[in-house]
Amino acid sequence: MIRANRVTLLAGALAVALAGVVRFVLPYEQEITSLWGFLVKLTPQLAAIVAIAWLDVEWARRLRLHLVAIPAVFLAFLLYFVPKTFMAAMDIEDKSGTFEDLYLHVVVFVPFLIVALLLAYRIGGGSREGVLRTGLAMSILHVSGLEDLVAVSMNRRLDAIPEVWGWADHITVRIGHPATKYEAYAFIAAHVVVALLVLFVPRRWLRRRSARSQE
């Protein structure tokens, strides 16, 4: 069992360790001030994707892991993320909390959702390639700025989409300055295209390209 899941065990332990560093060692705040800090905060999610991709499905089936892991994931949503969201919103309402508290909670929630979906897919018999493709695509979409675009589009307090996206630190640290509206559109479009390529480019095409590069 250990030999069959050695990559999963190592990557899983690394994911937990990196998550601890991100949560308890690095500044735990809404603002992203550097590209290095942004990339480090993605590492627990990426390590968890690798851990799930290399999970031995036959071993998981023999242990009937789905009967434990899937309900455990659901309980994490039900007993932590749901009440924590309510409490953070109530704290904002009665002025004892801030929007940053709610933001940081959601920042943890989204990677957990990605990992939970991938785990269910893999335990259900999904392929390693499928985990890597969907995990990478979802991670790209996660940092694409799509959520920012939808949020400002839904914000009834705004008459129009802002001309400069100064709040979107995850975009700012990658392009070097606060994005204008049209720069943000291009940034989002590029990420969506890359995510689609990750999902749908055939493996045989990648193999042909690799073979040609080695000639």
Image (cartoon, rainbow, N blue to C red):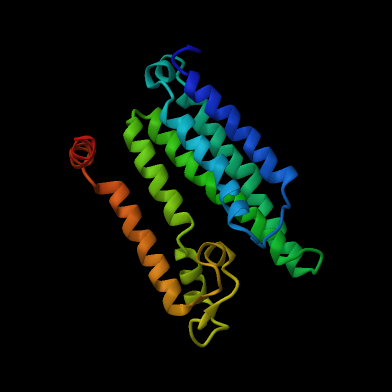
Q: Residue at x 74, y 67 (%)?
A: 92
- Residue sitting at 56 percent across and 74 percent down? 178
- Residue at point 74%, 44% (across, down): 25
Q: Position of residue 72 (x, y in %)?
A: 56, 32
Q: Residue furthest front?
A: 215
* Quarter of image, res 135: top left
Instruction: Give the image quarter of residue 166.
Output: bottom right
In this view, which residue lies farthest toward the bottom? 159
Q: Nearer the viewer, residue 165 or 207?
A: 207
From this view, report whether residue 78 is shown above or below residue 35: above
Decide: is 160 above or below 147: below
Q: Which of 157 and 79 lies nearest the eye of the viewer?
A: 157
Q: Relative to the observer, which residue lies in front, 203 or 8?
A: 203
Of 196 and 171, nearer the camera is 171
What residue appears at the point 78 percent right and 63 percent down from the top-left corner?
A: 97
| 207 over 106 or under it: above or below | above
The quadrant in which the C terminus is found is: top left
Q: Position of residue 181 (x, y in %)?
A: 46, 79
Coordinates of residue 77 in the picture (x, y in percent): 58, 44
Task: Please state if 27 lies on the left or on the right of 5 as rendered.
Answer: right
